[in-house]
Image: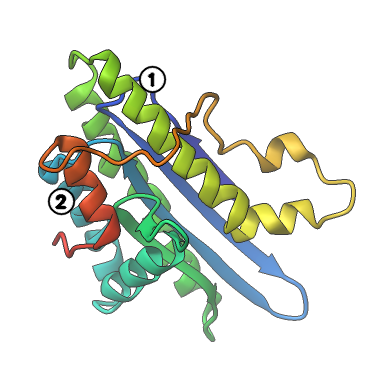
Amino acid sequence: QVHCSTSTVSPVSCITHTGNTFLRLIQWWFGGGTDLTPYYLDEDDVKHFHSVLKSACDRHDPQYYPNYKKWCDDYFHIQYRGERRGIGGIFFDDLEADNAGGVFNFVKDCAEAVIPSYIPLVKKHKKDAVSEAERRWQLLRRGRYVEFNLVYDRGTKFGFATPNARIESILMSLPLQARWEYMHKPEPGSPEFKITEVLKNPREWV
């Protein structure tokens, strides 16, 4: 298993998470994916992120990206909130084939797509000025990230159920700070409202 999560200081940047798993017991399978959680919607950023992932998928099968993009949207659904954790990416699990090498090469290409899909977004926004209101919104959105990871994430549940597990490693993807406010709703028409609408209604980006 290889998992990596980033949680940036700036609210105009994004959280990204990527993970790849290979399991071999009686039989083998691969699982993995990459998803993006921005606090504010920059459509050019989202299109870039998805286009890089799509290119990696298309090198192996043109159906991989649409299938795994939908799987990602469905998997990262906080059902009681009626919204997704972020703007998606790709997610897959239980991948098997007669040729393990072919599946491995696909997973490897997906892993190698993480840096070119994400780092340009960090560089683009690293000097952007931010306000206290934007920082507060960032912490509220981090709260949603925490909720998904603790309530729904399969890896977290599996880790908690494992005897003598290292709890700190299981919780490594959680942000250091988060916030909750009672019945908080963003102002209609605001940038916060805009990203929330996308989280409620996933879109096709490429």
| 178, 33: nearer the viewer | 178
Q: Is any atom of residue 59 visible in this view?
A: no
Q: How is the image coloured?
A: rainbow
Quarter of image, res 98: bottom right
Q: Is residue 30 above or below residue 141?
A: below
- Badge 1 vs badge 2, beta-carbon distance below 8 Å: no
Circle 1 packing at 10 Å, graded few (<14), some (14-19), many (20+), is few
Q: Is any atom of residue 142 visible in this view?
A: yes
Q: Position of residue 15 (x, y in %)?
A: 38, 37
Where is mark 1, residue-wise? 9
Q: Position of residue 173 (x, y in %)?
A: 56, 38
| Secondary element type, mark 1 | loop
The answer to whether 66 appears left or right of 110 in the picture is: left
* Residue at the image position 21 percent from the left and 53 percent from the top: 197
Instruction: Give the residue furthest to the front.
Output: 183
Q: Is residue 184 above or below residue 7?
A: below
The alpha-carbon separation of the residues under discs 1 and 2 comes to 23 Å
Three-letter code, disc 1: Val
Where is mark 2, residue-wise? 47
Q: Position of residue 196 (x, y in %)?
A: 26, 48
Three-letter code, disc 2: Lys
Mark closest to the chain's N terminus, 1 or 2 = 1
Instruction: Give the residue furthest to the right.
Output: 164
* Residue at the image position 39 percent from the left and 37 percent from the top: 141
Q: Position of residue 5 (x, y in %)?
A: 49, 38
* Residue at the image position 77 percent from the left and 52 percent from the top: 160
* Residue at the image position 77 percent from the left and 80 percent from the top: 26
| Secondary element type, mark 2 | helix
| 106, 88: nearer the viewer | 88
